[in-house]
Image: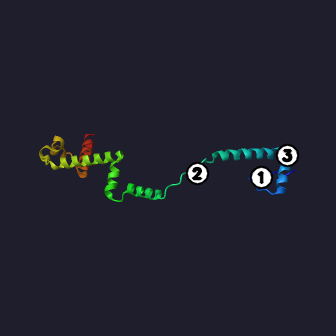
Amino acid sequence: MHDHVNDQIDDFLTGSLDGYALKVLHRHIDICRSCAKALREAREARGYLKMLRPAEPPPVPGPDFYFKVQRSIQQKSGTDWLSGMTAMFQRPRFVYPILFLFLGLLITAWSISFQSDWGADGILGIPPARFSGNIVSEADRMHSRDVVMVSLVDEN
């Protein structure tokens, strides 16, 4: 049984194998089909990787590029509270709830400012005296229950 040379294929393709190791690799590849296939696949993969390399180097930013980016970030973030509020009001999801809250508070303040005489008419035109007599205490309710029980016992 012979040892496979899969771990030496990358060294072979980069040209970093010495003379004896190169002879052993060639002899093994002539005999072993799986290692020959692995060598073909490795060459093919290296060819694809070469195609992925850019044809030209990426652009290099100018000397003041990072300074301009930092200044732009500082201008956008704004440190004073007024710029924060204006930025918040530029988003509609914040404007509408705040607008409705403000209008609700305005309507509430306007309705409270009118002094209506609720003593005579009550709320919504229902006189308050009509319903105040219906509210009974617990003691009155227990006394009424006892009166009903006594009357039921007397009838039987």
Q: CA distance from mark 2 to mark 3?
A: 40 Å
Q: Amino acid at mark 1?
A: Phe
Label of residue 133 in the image: none
Q: CA distance from mark 1 to mark 2?
A: 28 Å
Q: Residue at point 65% right, 45% down?
A: 51
Label of residue 57 in the image: 2
Q: Residues within 10 Å of mark 2 (few under 14, many from 20)?
A: few
Q: Secondary structure at mark 1?
A: helix
Q: Residues within 10 Å of mark 1 (few under 14, many from 20)?
A: some
In the rendered structure, which disc, 1 or 2, sits on the residue that comes first in sequence?
Answer: 1
Label 1, on which residue? Answer: 12
Residue sitting nearer the eye, 15 or 154: 15
Residue 28: in sight, yes or no? yes
Q: Amino acid at mark 2?
A: Pro
Q: Amino acid at mark 3?
A: Asp
In the rendered structure, which disc, 2 or 3, sits on the residue that comes first in sequence?
Answer: 3
Label 3, on which residue? Answer: 30
Residue sitting nearer the eye, 17 or 94: 17
Q: Are marks 1 and 2 in contact (CB under 8 Å)?
A: no
Residue sitting nearer the eye, 129 or 126: 126
Q: Residues within 10 Å of mark 3 (few under 14, many from 20)?
A: few
Q: Residue at point 22% right, 48% down?
A: 106
